[in-house]
Amino acid sequence: MSISATVKLQEAIFAALQGDAALGYDLTGIYDEAPADARYPYLAMGETSIRSGDLKDTSGAVINFDLMLWSDEASQMQVKELMATTDSALQNTDISLPGYDLVTLRLQSAGTVRQWSEAGSLYRGRLSYSALVYSN
């Protein structure tokens, strides 16, 4: 298992999302960590975890990661639409990782949460994925 697989996966995920025309039109930014002055709606990387996915003769890893979508619209529809567009972008793109084979990339769960801030109500969408990678 290699921690560097998480770096390669994040780079590949960001490249796939940034290359998607629909997301580029809908989002103001795609971030690892959104800056304090980020305008809504935007996407930011959430938590990431890694565990061994080794086989007898192959080094591998199971990488779980979250993508967070933020909206300041008055309803949760915008964030749900962004979640659907984001998932479609990942499922319909050939994602390659230098030094690794991406065996599977699956959406594990999705949800929306209403949050309150000084500026008013915000909606946060969370997409949780699991990826299986092997060293090549």
Image (spheres, rainbow, N blue to C red):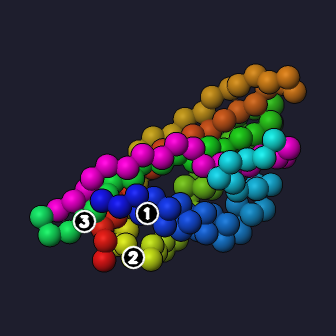
Of residues 56 and 128, the one nearer the viewer is: 56
N-terminal of the two: label 1 or label 2? 1
Region rendered in magenta? 37-55
Q: Write down the quadrant of residue 3 in the picture.
A: bottom left
Where disc 1 sits, the SS reads helix
Q: Where residue 65 appears, x then y in whole percent?
A: 48, 48
Q: Write down the quadrant of residue 23 in the picture.
A: bottom right
Where disc 3 sits, the SS reads loop
Q: CA distance from mark 1 to mark 2?
A: 10 Å
Q: Amino acid at mark 1?
A: Ser
State the residue at coordinates (73%, 47%).
Answer: 34
Q: Where residue 42 appears, x then y in whole percent?
A: 74, 49
Q: Is residue 45 magenta?
A: yes
Residue on which the image places disc 3: 59
Q: Residues within 10 Å of mark 1 (few under 14, many from 20)?
A: few
State the residue at coordinates (66%, 35%).
Answer: 124
N-terminal of the two: label 2 or label 3? 3
Q: Is residue 132 magenta?
A: no
Where disc 2 sits, the SS reads loop
N-terminal of the two: label 1 or label 3? 1
Disc 1 + disc 2, Cβ < 8 Å: yes
Does 120 sit above or below residue 109? above
Q: Amino acid at mark 3?
A: Ser
Q: Amino acid at mark 2?
A: Gly
Disc 1 + disc 3, Cβ < 8 Å: no
Of residues 66 and 21, the one nearer the viewer is: 66
Q: CA distance from mark 1 to mark 3?
A: 12 Å
Q: Which of the numbered marks, if any, corresponds to residue 99?
A: 2
Q: Which of the numbered marks, if any, corresponds to residue 4?
A: 1
Of residues 129 and 1, the one nearer the viewer is: 1
Q: Is residue 7 left or right of residue 36?
A: left
Q: Where the N terminus falls, by quadrant?
A: bottom left
